[in-house]
């Protein structure tokens, strides 16, 4: 469950040893760290396992799964958590915009996981940079974020998400009015902008979002959104695909509208999660209050 990164080898980098190339590309890590990842089969070239002595070639597609190892361990940090619910098995917080969920390239400290380690002291660890994490929210999305405090709870919650037993409801401010509708469109990685997702005809993964306007004014709409699938950036990509991007979205949004309204983050909020408790099996229903930056638009 580490954080994955895909990179393409340029002509200038061809014929370098794999471990040296990775250490040059990611200077925050040592060559020894990448040697350990390679030995643990966490680095692939063109989808195949390799050795650290492998020489790379121009055009090679390299996939790295960053994981906690003996060389790179996680740090517990005091980070204030706005706790919505907590018991012996799980914790739910109201994530503020700007909080990164788990350590990854460029964010090794100051994440929810660092705060979770401090708060819980003991978490299901495994070989992962995401102990206790069962789902994620984008950095600038606010709202209900769930974490497991035991291995048993983590396994069951991950299974509940996979089987779509977790019901999610979001709120968003969008540019324009998409109307009450079901938005469908397969989502996959953008063919050239690798950090972005996009609608792909006949490829990608099936995605479906229920959309309902709650109020509209001044060319903006306050929306209720229910994702029936859980694809990366699903709500942001689906709303862009119908010409009504989320206000403040710097990747999929409308730059002119973002500037006009002075919005610095995508106005997307994970409002409610409903799911079976991993131990008690009763249904839990957790809501996160609508954030301040939404209120001036509602």
Image: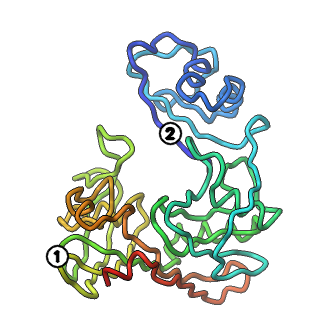
Q: Residues within 10 Å of mark 1 (few under 14, many from 20)?
A: few
**Could you give the CA–CA distance between mark 1 and mark 2, rounded to whole angstroms?**
38 Å
Query: Considering the numbered disc 2 on the image, is that residue within a helix, a strand or a loop?
Result: strand
First in sequence: mark 1 vs mark 2: 2
- Tag 1 secondary structure: loop
Q: Residue at x 70, y 61 (%)?
A: 115
Image position of 158 with respect to 65: above or below? below
Residue 175 relative to residue 32: left or right: left
Q: Position of residue 246 (x, y in %)?
A: 29, 67
Is the residue 278 above or below the residue 128 in the image? below
Front-lying residue, 296 or 228: 296
> At which x and y percent is residue 268?
39, 70
Residue linked to disc 1: 219
Say which of marks 1 and 2 sits in front: 1
Tell whether 95 sits left or right of 13: right
Marking on residue 5: 2
- List x then y, in percent, for residue 177: 18, 77
> Residue 108 in the image: x percent, y percent?
64, 45
Q: Tell me the residue at 34%/66% (across/down).
A: 235
Point out which mark residue 211 bears: none
Say if mark 1 contacts mark 2, CB within 8 Å: no
């Amino acid at each position: 469950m580490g954080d994955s990164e895909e990179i393409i080898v340029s002509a200038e980098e061809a014929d370098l040893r794999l471990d040296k190339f990775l250490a040059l590309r990611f200077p925050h890590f040592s060559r020894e760290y990448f040697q350990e990842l390679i030995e643990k089969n966490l680095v692939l070239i063109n989808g195949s396992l390799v050795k650290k002595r492998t020489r790379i070639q121009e055009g090679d597609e390299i996939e790295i799964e960053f994981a906690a190892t003996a060389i790179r361990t996680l740090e517990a940090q005091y980070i204030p958590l706005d706790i919505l619910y907590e018991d012996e098995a799980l914790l739910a917080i109201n994530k503020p915009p700007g909080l990164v969920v788990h350590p990854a390239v460029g964010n090794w400290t100051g994440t929810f996981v660092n705060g979770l380690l401090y708060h819980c002291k003991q978490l299901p660890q495994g070989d992962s940079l995401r102990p206790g994490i069962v789902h994620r929210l984008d950095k600038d999305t606010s709202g209900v974020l769930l974490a497991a405090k035991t291995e048993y709870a983590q396994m069951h919650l991950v299974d509940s998400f996979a089987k779509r037993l977790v019901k999610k409801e979001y709120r968003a401010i969008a540019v324009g009015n998409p109307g009450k509708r079901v938005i469908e469109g397969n989502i996959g990685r953008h063919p050239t902008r690798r950090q972005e997702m996009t609608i792909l005809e006949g490829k990608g993964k099936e995605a479906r979002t229920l959309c309902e306007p709650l109020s509209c004014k001044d060319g903006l709409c306050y929306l209720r959104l229910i994702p029936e699938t859980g694809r990366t950036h699903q709500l942001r990509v689906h709303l862009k695909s119908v010409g009504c991007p989320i206000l403040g979205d710097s990747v999929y949004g409308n730059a002119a509208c973002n500037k006009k309204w002075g919005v610095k983050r995508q106005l997307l909020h994970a409002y409610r999660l409903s799911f079976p408790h991993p131990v008690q099996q009763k249904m839990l229903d957790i809501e996160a209050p609508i954030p301040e930056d939404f209120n001036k638009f509602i």
